[in-house]
Amino acid sequence: MCKGGKTMQDLLSGLRVLDFTTNVAGPVATAMLADYGASVIKVERPVRGDDNRSFPPMMDGQGFIHFWCNRGKQSITIDLGDPDGKRIVEQLVRECDIVVESYRPGIMKKFGMDYESFAAIKPDIIYCSVSAYGLVGPYSKRPGYDLIAQAMSGQMDLNGEADGAPMKSGMTLGDYWAGLNAYSALVTAWFHHMRTGEGQMIDASLLQNLLFNNDTVLDYNIGQYKTRSGNDHPYHAPYGQFKGPDGRYLIICVERDDVWARLAGLLGHEELAGLTEQERIDHRLVHRNMIEEWLGGFETTDQALKALEEAEIPSCKVSNMKEVSTDPHVLENEWLTQVDLPEDITTLRSWLTRNVNVTFSKTPGVSKPSPALGNCNYSVLERLGMTKDEIDQLQKKWNP
Protein backbone atom coordinates (compact mmCIF):
# COMPACT_ATOMS: atom_id res chain seq x y z
CA MET A 1 0.00 0.00 0.00
CA CYS A 2 1.24 3.49 -0.86
CA LYS A 3 -0.81 5.41 1.70
CA GLY A 4 -0.92 4.74 5.43
CA GLY A 5 -4.23 4.84 7.26
CA LYS A 6 -5.44 8.35 8.05
CA THR A 7 -7.40 9.68 10.97
CA MET A 8 -10.00 12.39 10.54
CA GLN A 9 -7.92 14.87 12.51
CA ASP A 10 -4.35 14.52 11.27
CA LEU A 11 -2.34 17.45 12.58
CA LEU A 12 -0.10 17.68 9.51
CA SER A 13 -2.57 16.57 6.84
CA GLY A 14 -1.67 18.21 3.53
CA LEU A 15 2.01 18.69 4.40
CA ARG A 16 4.16 17.15 1.64
CA VAL A 17 7.65 15.90 2.46
CA LEU A 18 10.44 14.65 0.20
CA ASP A 19 12.75 12.45 2.24
CA PHE A 20 16.37 11.72 1.21
CA THR A 21 17.43 10.54 4.67
CA THR A 22 19.28 7.37 5.58
CA ASN A 23 20.52 5.52 8.69
CA VAL A 24 18.60 6.64 11.84
CA ALA A 25 18.53 10.33 12.81
CA GLY A 26 17.04 11.74 9.60
CA PRO A 27 14.53 8.90 9.13
CA VAL A 28 13.32 9.40 12.73
CA ALA A 29 12.46 13.05 11.94
CA THR A 30 10.47 12.23 8.81
CA ALA A 31 8.76 9.22 10.42
CA MET A 32 7.43 11.56 13.11
CA LEU A 33 6.05 13.85 10.41
CA ALA A 34 4.28 10.80 8.95
CA ASP A 35 2.92 9.86 12.39
CA TYR A 36 0.99 13.12 12.48
CA GLY A 37 -0.40 12.96 8.97
CA ALA A 38 2.23 14.38 6.59
CA SER A 39 2.62 12.66 3.23
CA VAL A 40 6.25 11.50 3.14
CA ILE A 41 7.86 10.25 -0.08
CA LYS A 42 11.08 8.47 0.79
CA VAL A 43 13.67 8.48 -2.01
CA GLU A 44 15.89 5.40 -1.79
CA ARG A 45 18.73 3.93 -3.79
CA PRO A 46 17.68 1.27 -6.28
CA VAL A 47 18.32 -2.34 -5.22
CA ARG A 48 19.77 -1.62 -1.76
CA GLY A 49 17.55 1.15 -0.38
CA ASP A 50 18.15 2.91 2.93
CA ASP A 51 21.16 1.62 4.88
CA ASN A 52 18.90 0.86 7.84
CA ARG A 53 17.16 -1.85 5.81
CA SER A 54 20.25 -3.99 6.45
CA PHE A 55 20.84 -3.14 10.14
CA PRO A 56 20.43 -6.20 12.42
CA PRO A 57 18.43 -7.72 13.96
CA MET A 58 16.78 -8.87 10.74
CA MET A 59 13.53 -10.49 9.66
CA ASP A 60 13.07 -11.84 6.13
CA GLY A 61 16.18 -9.93 5.05
CA GLN A 62 14.97 -6.59 6.47
CA GLY A 63 16.32 -4.67 9.45
CA PHE A 64 13.96 -4.13 12.38
CA ILE A 65 15.15 -0.52 12.70
CA HIS A 66 13.88 0.12 9.15
CA PHE A 67 10.40 -1.02 10.18
CA TRP A 68 10.39 1.73 12.80
CA CYS A 69 12.41 4.55 11.18
CA ASN A 70 10.51 4.43 7.89
CA ARG A 71 7.00 3.87 9.21
CA GLY A 72 4.18 5.58 7.37
CA LYS A 73 6.24 6.54 4.30
CA GLN A 74 5.91 5.94 0.57
CA SER A 75 9.08 4.47 -0.95
CA ILE A 76 10.36 5.25 -4.42
CA THR A 77 13.74 4.24 -5.85
CA ILE A 78 15.72 6.82 -7.84
CA ASP A 79 19.30 6.91 -9.07
CA LEU A 80 20.26 10.43 -7.99
CA GLY A 81 23.32 10.42 -10.25
CA ASP A 82 21.25 9.77 -13.39
CA PRO A 83 19.92 12.85 -15.30
CA ASP A 84 16.52 11.11 -15.51
CA GLY A 85 16.57 10.70 -11.76
CA LYS A 86 17.43 14.35 -11.24
CA ARG A 87 14.54 15.45 -13.46
CA ILE A 88 12.11 13.35 -11.44
CA VAL A 89 13.47 14.78 -8.17
CA GLU A 90 13.02 18.34 -9.47
CA GLN A 91 9.41 17.57 -10.38
CA LEU A 92 8.81 16.21 -6.90
CA VAL A 93 10.41 19.25 -5.27
CA ARG A 94 7.96 21.54 -7.07
CA GLU A 95 5.02 19.81 -5.37
CA CYS A 96 6.56 19.39 -1.91
CA ASP A 97 6.74 21.71 1.10
CA ILE A 98 9.69 20.15 2.94
CA VAL A 99 12.90 18.39 1.91
CA VAL A 100 14.97 16.46 4.47
CA GLU A 101 18.35 14.84 3.77
CA SER A 102 21.04 13.26 5.93
CA TYR A 103 24.03 12.79 3.67
CA ARG A 104 27.46 14.05 4.62
CA PRO A 105 27.60 17.82 3.85
CA GLY A 106 28.56 18.39 0.23
CA ILE A 107 27.04 15.21 -1.20
CA MET A 108 23.67 16.72 -2.10
CA LYS A 109 25.44 19.69 -3.70
CA LYS A 110 27.31 17.29 -5.99
CA PHE A 111 23.94 15.98 -7.15
CA GLY A 112 22.65 19.54 -7.64
CA MET A 113 20.14 18.91 -4.85
CA ASP A 114 21.31 21.23 -2.08
CA TYR A 115 19.17 23.96 -0.54
CA GLU A 116 20.22 26.63 -3.06
CA SER A 117 19.42 24.38 -6.02
CA PHE A 118 15.99 23.44 -4.71
CA ALA A 119 15.19 27.01 -3.58
CA ALA A 120 15.82 28.13 -7.17
CA ILE A 121 13.08 25.67 -8.23
CA LYS A 122 10.74 26.36 -5.30
CA PRO A 123 11.67 29.52 -3.35
CA ASP A 124 9.49 28.71 -0.33
CA ILE A 125 10.94 25.24 0.23
CA ILE A 126 11.89 24.24 3.78
CA TYR A 127 15.11 22.22 3.61
CA CYS A 128 16.59 20.34 6.57
CA SER A 129 20.05 18.78 6.62
CA VAL A 130 20.68 16.23 9.38
CA SER A 131 24.38 15.39 9.78
CA ALA A 132 26.92 14.37 12.40
CA TYR A 133 28.63 17.74 12.93
CA GLY A 134 26.54 20.34 11.08
CA LEU A 135 27.16 22.20 7.84
CA VAL A 136 29.84 24.62 9.10
CA GLY A 137 33.16 24.15 10.86
CA PRO A 138 36.37 22.11 10.60
CA TYR A 139 34.61 18.80 11.29
CA SER A 140 31.61 19.28 9.00
CA LYS A 141 32.71 16.97 6.21
CA ARG A 142 34.02 14.19 8.42
CA PRO A 143 32.11 10.91 8.60
CA GLY A 144 30.39 10.54 11.95
CA TYR A 145 27.95 8.38 13.86
CA ASP A 146 26.06 8.38 17.15
CA LEU A 147 28.95 7.01 19.22
CA ILE A 148 31.32 9.69 17.92
CA ALA A 149 28.80 12.42 18.77
CA GLN A 150 28.40 10.99 22.29
CA ALA A 151 32.17 11.08 22.75
CA MET A 152 32.73 14.58 21.33
CA SER A 153 29.79 16.17 23.17
CA GLY A 154 31.12 15.24 26.63
CA GLN A 155 28.25 12.79 27.19
CA MET A 156 30.44 9.69 27.39
CA ASP A 157 32.74 11.31 29.95
CA LEU A 158 29.69 11.67 32.22
CA ASN A 159 28.66 8.02 31.96
CA GLY A 160 30.21 5.19 33.96
CA GLU A 161 31.63 4.66 37.42
CA ALA A 162 33.75 7.40 39.01
CA ASP A 163 36.91 5.28 38.85
CA GLY A 164 36.06 3.62 35.53
CA ALA A 165 36.31 4.38 31.83
CA PRO A 166 33.87 6.62 29.94
CA MET A 167 30.80 4.67 28.83
CA LYS A 168 28.37 5.14 25.99
CA SER A 169 24.62 5.23 26.48
CA GLY A 170 22.79 1.95 25.99
CA MET A 171 20.59 3.77 23.46
CA THR A 172 21.57 5.72 20.35
CA LEU A 173 20.90 9.05 22.03
CA GLY A 174 22.58 11.17 19.36
CA ASP A 175 20.48 9.72 16.56
CA TYR A 176 17.15 9.88 18.36
CA TRP A 177 17.76 13.28 19.95
CA ALA A 178 18.81 14.78 16.61
CA GLY A 179 15.81 13.20 14.89
CA LEU A 180 13.36 14.48 17.49
CA ASN A 181 14.77 18.00 17.36
CA ALA A 182 14.90 18.02 13.57
CA TYR A 183 11.20 17.14 13.62
CA SER A 184 10.53 19.98 16.07
CA ALA A 185 12.50 22.39 13.89
CA LEU A 186 10.61 21.35 10.76
CA VAL A 187 7.22 21.88 12.40
CA THR A 188 8.40 25.26 13.73
CA ALA A 189 9.64 26.27 10.27
CA TRP A 190 6.31 25.16 8.80
CA PHE A 191 4.49 27.39 11.30
CA HIS A 192 6.71 30.28 10.18
CA HIS A 193 5.94 29.43 6.55
CA MET A 194 2.20 29.48 7.22
CA ARG A 195 2.51 33.00 8.65
CA THR A 196 4.99 34.47 6.16
CA GLY A 197 5.15 32.23 3.10
CA GLU A 198 8.90 31.92 3.55
CA GLY A 199 11.02 28.80 3.33
CA GLN A 200 14.41 28.37 4.97
CA MET A 201 17.40 26.13 5.60
CA ILE A 202 17.63 24.07 8.80
CA ASP A 203 20.96 22.67 10.01
CA ALA A 204 20.47 19.84 12.55
CA SER A 205 23.35 17.73 13.81
CA LEU A 206 23.95 14.92 16.28
CA LEU A 207 26.76 16.83 17.97
CA GLN A 208 24.81 20.07 18.44
CA ASN A 209 21.80 18.24 19.84
CA LEU A 210 23.83 16.24 22.34
CA LEU A 211 25.52 19.47 23.47
CA PHE A 212 22.03 20.93 23.90
CA ASN A 213 21.26 17.93 26.10
CA ASN A 214 24.42 18.36 28.20
CA ASP A 215 23.50 20.47 31.23
CA THR A 216 27.00 20.21 32.69
CA VAL A 217 27.97 23.13 30.42
CA LEU A 218 26.30 25.29 33.08
CA ASP A 219 28.83 24.14 35.70
CA TYR A 220 31.64 25.55 33.57
CA ASN A 221 30.51 29.05 34.57
CA ILE A 222 31.46 28.47 38.20
CA GLY A 223 34.68 26.61 37.49
CA GLN A 224 33.30 23.12 38.05
CA TYR A 225 33.88 20.28 35.60
CA LYS A 226 31.50 17.46 36.35
CA THR A 227 32.59 13.97 35.37
CA ARG A 228 31.50 10.40 36.04
CA SER A 229 29.60 9.63 39.23
CA GLY A 230 28.16 6.21 38.43
CA ASN A 231 24.51 5.86 39.37
CA ASP A 232 24.66 8.54 42.06
CA HIS A 233 23.58 12.14 41.51
CA PRO A 234 26.37 14.68 42.08
CA TYR A 235 24.08 17.26 43.71
CA HIS A 236 21.43 15.16 45.48
CA ALA A 237 21.65 12.30 47.99
CA PRO A 238 20.47 9.68 48.46
CA TYR A 239 19.64 9.63 44.76
CA GLY A 240 20.72 6.54 42.84
CA GLN A 241 20.64 2.81 42.33
CA PHE A 242 20.58 0.25 45.16
CA LYS A 243 20.67 -3.54 45.19
CA GLY A 244 17.60 -5.25 46.62
CA PRO A 245 17.54 -8.36 48.82
CA ASP A 246 16.85 -10.71 45.89
CA GLY A 247 19.53 -9.25 43.64
CA ARG A 248 17.20 -6.93 41.70
CA TYR A 249 18.18 -3.30 41.45
CA LEU A 250 15.96 -0.39 42.45
CA ILE A 251 16.08 3.39 42.29
CA ILE A 252 15.52 5.79 45.20
CA CYS A 253 15.40 9.54 44.51
CA VAL A 254 15.51 12.14 47.28
CA GLU A 255 15.62 15.78 46.15
CA ARG A 256 13.61 17.57 48.85
CA ASP A 257 14.06 17.86 52.61
CA ASP A 258 10.55 16.58 53.34
CA VAL A 259 11.18 13.45 51.28
CA TRP A 260 14.44 12.87 53.17
CA ALA A 261 12.62 13.26 56.49
CA ARG A 262 10.14 10.54 55.49
CA LEU A 263 12.93 8.25 54.32
CA ALA A 264 14.91 8.80 57.53
CA GLY A 265 11.83 7.78 59.51
CA LEU A 266 11.33 4.72 57.33
CA LEU A 267 14.95 3.71 57.95
CA GLY A 268 14.45 4.10 61.71
CA HIS A 269 16.72 7.14 61.95
CA GLU A 270 14.33 9.96 62.76
CA GLU A 271 17.24 11.83 64.38
CA LEU A 272 18.65 12.44 60.87
CA ALA A 273 15.47 13.98 59.49
CA GLY A 274 16.78 17.55 59.77
CA LEU A 275 19.96 17.06 57.72
CA THR A 276 20.52 19.59 54.93
CA GLU A 277 21.13 18.64 51.32
CA GLN A 278 24.85 19.32 51.67
CA GLU A 279 25.06 17.22 54.83
CA ARG A 280 23.35 14.37 53.01
CA ILE A 281 25.84 14.67 50.16
CA ASP A 282 28.77 14.73 52.62
CA HIS A 283 27.49 11.55 54.29
CA ARG A 284 26.36 9.83 51.11
CA LEU A 285 28.18 6.54 51.80
CA VAL A 286 26.95 6.32 55.40
CA HIS A 287 23.35 6.74 54.25
CA ARG A 288 23.84 4.26 51.42
CA ASN A 289 24.90 1.67 53.97
CA MET A 290 21.82 2.46 56.06
CA ILE A 291 19.53 2.01 53.06
CA GLU A 292 21.17 -1.27 52.03
CA GLU A 293 20.88 -2.56 55.60
CA TRP A 294 17.19 -1.61 55.61
CA LEU A 295 16.66 -3.34 52.24
CA GLY A 296 18.21 -6.49 53.68
CA GLY A 297 15.27 -6.76 56.07
CA PHE A 298 12.94 -7.69 53.20
CA GLU A 299 12.65 -10.95 51.31
CA THR A 300 12.06 -9.31 47.92
CA THR A 301 12.71 -6.00 46.20
CA ASP A 302 8.97 -5.68 45.52
CA GLN A 303 8.27 -5.69 49.27
CA ALA A 304 10.78 -2.90 49.82
CA LEU A 305 9.29 -0.89 46.97
CA LYS A 306 5.82 -1.25 48.48
CA ALA A 307 7.10 0.27 51.75
CA LEU A 308 8.79 3.11 49.84
CA GLU A 309 5.64 3.79 47.83
CA GLU A 310 3.48 3.91 50.97
CA ALA A 311 5.89 6.51 52.40
CA GLU A 312 5.71 8.46 49.11
CA ILE A 313 9.42 8.07 48.43
CA PRO A 314 10.08 8.34 44.65
CA SER A 315 11.35 4.89 43.73
CA CYS A 316 11.05 2.09 41.21
CA LYS A 317 12.54 -1.21 40.12
CA VAL A 318 15.08 -1.21 37.30
CA SER A 319 13.02 -2.92 34.58
CA ASN A 320 14.26 -5.00 31.69
CA MET A 321 12.55 -4.73 28.31
CA LYS A 322 10.52 -7.89 28.81
CA GLU A 323 9.01 -6.29 31.91
CA VAL A 324 8.46 -2.98 30.13
CA SER A 325 6.55 -4.73 27.34
CA THR A 326 4.04 -6.15 29.84
CA ASP A 327 3.91 -3.19 32.25
CA PRO A 328 0.21 -2.39 32.90
CA HIS A 329 0.87 1.36 32.90
CA VAL A 330 2.66 1.20 29.54
CA LEU A 331 -0.10 -0.98 28.08
CA GLU A 332 -2.99 1.16 29.34
CA ASN A 333 -1.41 4.25 27.78
CA GLU A 334 -0.67 2.33 24.55
CA TRP A 335 2.92 3.54 24.50
CA LEU A 336 3.73 0.24 22.83
CA THR A 337 1.49 -0.88 20.01
CA GLN A 338 1.01 -3.58 17.39
CA VAL A 339 1.71 -2.30 13.87
CA ASP A 340 1.43 -4.11 10.55
CA LEU A 341 4.67 -5.06 8.83
CA PRO A 342 5.43 -4.35 5.14
CA GLU A 343 3.81 -6.62 2.58
CA ASP A 344 7.15 -8.25 1.72
CA ILE A 345 7.56 -9.57 5.30
CA THR A 346 5.98 -13.00 5.75
CA THR A 347 7.39 -14.37 9.03
CA LEU A 348 5.07 -12.08 11.02
CA ARG A 349 2.23 -9.83 9.86
CA SER A 350 2.53 -7.36 12.74
CA TRP A 351 5.00 -6.52 15.49
CA LEU A 352 5.06 -4.86 18.90
CA THR A 353 6.80 -1.51 18.64
CA ARG A 354 6.99 1.98 20.07
CA ASN A 355 3.94 4.13 19.49
CA VAL A 356 3.99 7.86 18.74
CA ASN A 357 5.96 10.11 21.08
CA VAL A 358 3.16 12.08 22.81
CA THR A 359 -0.60 11.75 23.24
CA PHE A 360 -2.97 14.38 21.81
CA SER A 361 -6.58 14.39 22.96
CA LYS A 362 -8.10 15.55 19.65
CA THR A 363 -5.44 14.88 17.02
CA PRO A 364 -3.72 11.61 17.92
CA GLY A 365 -0.80 10.38 15.87
CA VAL A 366 -0.91 6.97 14.25
CA SER A 367 2.06 4.65 13.89
CA LYS A 368 1.76 3.13 10.40
CA PRO A 369 3.57 0.31 8.57
CA SER A 370 6.90 0.90 6.83
CA PRO A 371 7.08 0.47 3.03
CA ALA A 372 8.57 -2.27 0.92
CA LEU A 373 11.44 -0.91 -1.19
CA GLY A 374 10.02 1.02 -4.16
CA ASN A 375 6.42 0.17 -3.25
CA CYS A 376 5.16 3.46 -4.67
CA ASN A 377 7.36 3.76 -7.77
CA TYR A 378 4.45 3.49 -10.17
CA SER A 379 1.83 5.46 -8.26
CA VAL A 380 4.15 8.42 -7.65
CA LEU A 381 5.74 8.52 -11.10
CA GLU A 382 2.42 8.08 -12.89
CA ARG A 383 1.12 11.07 -10.95
CA LEU A 384 4.03 13.04 -12.41
CA GLY A 385 2.80 12.15 -15.89
CA MET A 386 5.03 9.19 -16.74
CA THR A 387 3.60 6.20 -18.59
CA LYS A 388 3.93 2.63 -17.39
CA ASP A 389 6.35 1.87 -20.24
CA GLU A 390 8.56 4.82 -19.28
CA ILE A 391 8.63 3.69 -15.65
CA ASP A 392 9.40 0.12 -16.74
CA GLN A 393 12.41 1.37 -18.71
CA LEU A 394 13.73 3.33 -15.71
CA GLN A 395 13.30 0.35 -13.41
CA LYS A 396 15.17 -1.87 -15.85
CA LYS A 397 18.00 0.69 -16.07
CA TRP A 398 18.25 1.24 -12.30
CA ASN A 399 17.69 -2.37 -11.26
CA PRO A 400 19.92 -4.40 -13.63
Image: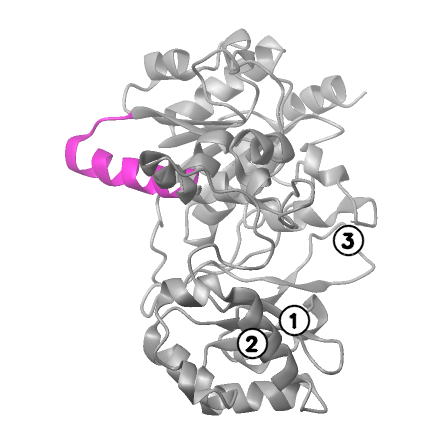
- Where disc 2 sits, the SS reads strand
**In whole angstroms, how far apart are the C-alphas of marks 1 and 3?**
31 Å
- The residue range painted magenta reads 182-199
Quarter of image, res 400: top right
Query: Residue 319, labelled with which disc?
Result: 1
Q: Is residue 194 magenta?
A: yes
Query: Residue 316, labelled with which disc?
Result: 2
Residue 355 horizontal side relative to residue 311, left or right: right
Mark 1 and mark 2 in contact? Answer it, CB < 8 Å: yes
Q: Main secondary structure of the magenta part?
A: helix
Query: Residue 217, labelled with which disc?
Result: none
Q: Position of residue 399 (x, y in %)?
A: 77, 23
> Label 3 is placed on what type of residue?
Ile
Res. 29 visible in picture: no
Q: Nearer the viewer, residue 325 or 17?
A: 325
Q: Position of residue 367 (x, y in %)?
A: 53, 58
Query: Eyeballing the image, is 240 above or below 215?
Result: below
Residue under label 3, please give it: 345
Q: Residue at x 65, y 82 (%)?
A: 293
Q: Nearer the viewer, residue 185 or 3?
A: 185
